[in-house]
Image: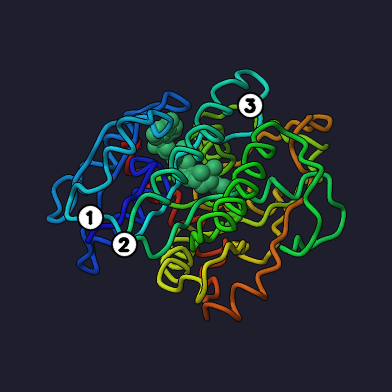
């Protein structure tokens, strides 16, 4: 039996697949190398996976019905799915909304259809996002909070995924868990996310633009913790048919100015910061309430930014040959 990991050339997907292979699982990975950011980084993440026994790769679009439904009955059978492929990023969803609906909504539906057709399926785990908390003012964000005011199309597609999964679980007895990932960073991280953008600006001596006049806080979550959390959840499906949602985050809200200070220290170089007004679609603060996740799965994040940011910078320098 194999685990299907979609978005396997992505930041979280590659690490999840690597962790599954490391514990002896067979993994079928799917990715279409979307151009949301430079696919060269995706090829580099995929290389070590392709050299590992037990890994099979399929270049395909998750919204392509034929390719995805065709996975059923192949590769010795799939008994778990970790569906991480998505068009991510808040700002880009205002530039090209159609690709968000196509990948995140249609792609998710295709994965649900695949899942319901798999007779041996034990667990369908998929990525939602902290963005679903949208305009909520109550912090930290808890799963029991209402989430009906998404402030970006990206957030709306992730919420749609949760609702469609709820329906499939109700109709077809699918055992499913949605993970609301909070801002994830670390080695092999995404060039379109703040730690990478800030690091690049500091290195190149260019200004960092901070929205909301710099009054920004993020729950920065280290990649190894998020991978451990994803596997802990995957390994514990709901006892009965059902759909659950959990937060995965560091449960520590970091002031972005502090994160920039850690980056400055790691580069031994001062940042130039330009304060900008609020940006539509972005949340001024995110913080995860992970009490339920810890109680149910015994998972707690271990790596604080003071340790994680220097590790990220070490990788950033090595990867970019600085
Ligand atoms: N990284 C974070 O901070 C964060 C936060 C919240 C939610 N998430 C969610 O977690 C998941 C993984 O995020 P990530 O940071 O690894 O993003 P990522 O962009 O690095 O990885 C996603 C991967 O999916 C692939 N992909 C995109 N469209 C596809 C399609 N139509 N068919 C097949 N593959 C496709 C991309 O090529 C990419 O390799 C996503 O669903 C994302 O929305 C991530």
Q: Secondary structure at mark 1?
A: loop
Return the residue found at the far front: 171
Q: Residues within 10 Å of mark 3 (few under 14, many from 20)?
A: many
Left or right, 256 with respect to 96, comes to right
Q: Earlier in the sequence, mark 1 or mark 2?
A: 1
Q: Earlier in the sequence, mark 3 or mark 1?
A: 1
Separation (CA) of disc 3 from disc 1: 35 Å
Taking the spot 61% from the left edge, 51% from the top edge, the residue there is 167
Q: Which residue is mark 1?
A: 77
User: 119 or 284, which lies in front?
Assistant: 119
Q: Quadrant of the N terminus?
A: bottom left
**Is residue 180 something one can see in this rendering?**
yes
Cβ–Cβ under 8 Å for marks 3 and 2 = no
**Residue 119 image point, x, y percent:** 33, 58
Q: Secondary structure at mark 3?
A: helix
Q: Which residue is mark 2?
A: 120
Separation (CA) of disc 3 from disc 2: 36 Å
Q: Secondary structure at mark 2?
A: loop
Cβ–Cβ under 8 Å for marks 3 and 1 = no
Q: Which residue is mark 3?
A: 93
Q: Tell whether circle 2 marks a residue whose Cβ is less than 8 angstroms from ligand 1.
A: no
From this view, report whether residue 284 is shown above or below residue 65.
below
Taking the spot 49% from the left edge, 37% from the top edge, the residue there is 86
């Amino acid at each position: 039996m194999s685990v299907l990991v979609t978005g396997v050339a992505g930041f979280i997907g590659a690490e999840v697949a690597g962790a599954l292979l490391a514990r002896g699982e067979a993994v079928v990975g799917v990715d279409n190398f979307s151009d949301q950011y430079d696919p060269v980084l995706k090829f580099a993440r995929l290389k070590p996976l392709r050299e590992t026994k037990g890994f099979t790769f399929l270049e395909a679009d998750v919204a392509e019905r034929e390719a995805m439904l065709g996975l059923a009955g192949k590769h010795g059978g799939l008994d778990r799915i970790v569906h991480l492929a998505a068009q991510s990023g808040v700002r880009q969803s205002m530039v090209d909304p159609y690709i968000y609906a196509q990948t995140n909504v249609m792609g998710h539906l295709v994965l649900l259809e695949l899942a319901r057709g798999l007779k041996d399926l034990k667990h369908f785990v998929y990525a939602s996002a902290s963005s679903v908390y949208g305009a909520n003012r109550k912090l930290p964000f808890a799963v029991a909070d209402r989430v009906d005011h998404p402030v970006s199309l990206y957030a709306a597609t992730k919420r749609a995924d949760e609702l469609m999964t709820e329906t499939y679980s109700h109709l077809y007895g699918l055992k499913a868990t949605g993970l609301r990932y909070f801002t994830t960073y670390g080695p092999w991280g995404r060039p379109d996310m703040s730690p990478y953008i800030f690091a690049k600006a500091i290195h190149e001596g260019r200004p960092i633009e901070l929205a909301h006049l710099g009054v920004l806080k993020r729950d920065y979550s280290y990649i190894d913790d998020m991978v451990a959390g994803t596997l802990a959840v995957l390994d514990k499906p709901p006892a009965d048919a059902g759909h659950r949602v959990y937060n995965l985050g560091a449960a520590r809200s970091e002031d972005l100015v502090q994160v920039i200070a850690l980056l400055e220290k790691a580069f031994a170089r001062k940042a130039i910061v330009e304060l900008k007004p609020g940006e539509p679609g972005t949340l001024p603060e995110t913080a995860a309430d992970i009490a339920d996740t810890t109680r149910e799965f015994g998972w707690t994040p271990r790596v604080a930014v003071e340790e994680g940011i220097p590790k990220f910078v070490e990788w950033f320098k090595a990867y970019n040959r600085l």
